[in-house]
Amino acid sequence: MAKTKEERAAYHKKWYAANAEKMRLYRKEYRAKNADARQAYNESRKDAQQEYFRAYAKKRRQQNPGLKREEYQKRKLKNPEGIAAMRRRGYEKHVTELSDGYVKRVLVFGNNLKPADIPQELVDVKRIQIKIQREIKNAKRNATA
């Protein structure tokens, strides 16, 4: 006698409720046994997933042009300290890694240039100069300490 889809679903729901602990342990053991295979599978799909989510985000932004800004404003009102800390961490990361944007901001500070006016070669040279200045500063601190 064939059961309907709803009857099968009810049976499985009841069975999983009765055997929840057994299934939890089974899944935990399975994950532990197959960790390498799961990691390899996840790595193999990483590029495809990134492309999919980039395309999805782009489509969503095009359909809702002001949505991202509105969501950010809501988060900023709810948690201003958290947003400030997040922005500070992002800025510190750019400073320590000497990102192109940070180096361009250093170059345009105090004059009427725009970041778009600065060629990449100048950014690369300025980055080297900043690294040298930082090394000299660190050497002086270590010498006095």
Image (tube, rainbow, N blue to C red):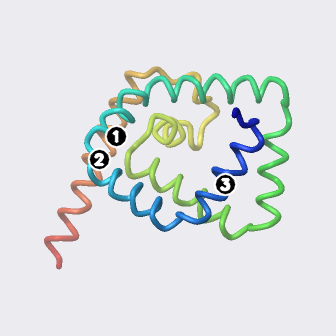
Q: Is residue 133 above or below residue 100?
A: below
Q: The residue under label 3 is which amino acid type?
A: Lys
Task: Report how far apart the C-alphas of labels 1 and 3 lie in the structure.
Answer: 27 Å
- Taking the spot 37% from the left edge, 35% from the top edge, the residue there is 126
Instruction: Name the residue furthest bottom.
Output: 145
Which of disc 3 and disc 1 is earlier in sequence?
Answer: 3
Residue at the left extreme of this rendering: 143
Name the residue rendered at 45%, 52% in the picture: 93
- Mark in the foreground, 2 or 3: 3
Q: Report whether 4 appears left or right of 66.
A: left
Residue 38's disc number: 1
Q: Mark 3 points at which residue?
A: 13
Circles 1, 3 touching at the beta carbon (< 8 Å): no
Q: Residues within 10 Å of mark 1 (few under 14, many from 20)?
A: few
Whether residue 145 sits left or right of residue 103 in the image: it is left
Give the spatial CA distance, label 2 vs label 3: 28 Å
Determine the residue positioned at 74% across, 68% down: 79
On screen, residue 90 above or below 6: below
Return the mark for residue 35.
Answer: 2
Query: Which of the numbered marks, if any, corresponds to residue 134?
Result: none
Q: What element carries label 3?
A: helix
Q: Which residue is drawn at 64% across and 33% down?
A: 112
Q: In the rendered image, which quarter is residue 54 located in? A: top right
Task: Give how far apart the Cα atoms at labels 2 and 1 are.
Answer: 5 Å
**Nearer-N-terminus badge (2/3):** 3
Residue mark closest to the camera, 1 vs 3: 3
Identify whether 142 is placed above or below 98. Answer: below
Question: Circles 2 and 1: CB distance less than 8 Å?
Answer: yes
Disc 2 residue crowd, few under 14, some 14–19, many 20+, Cα 10 Å: few
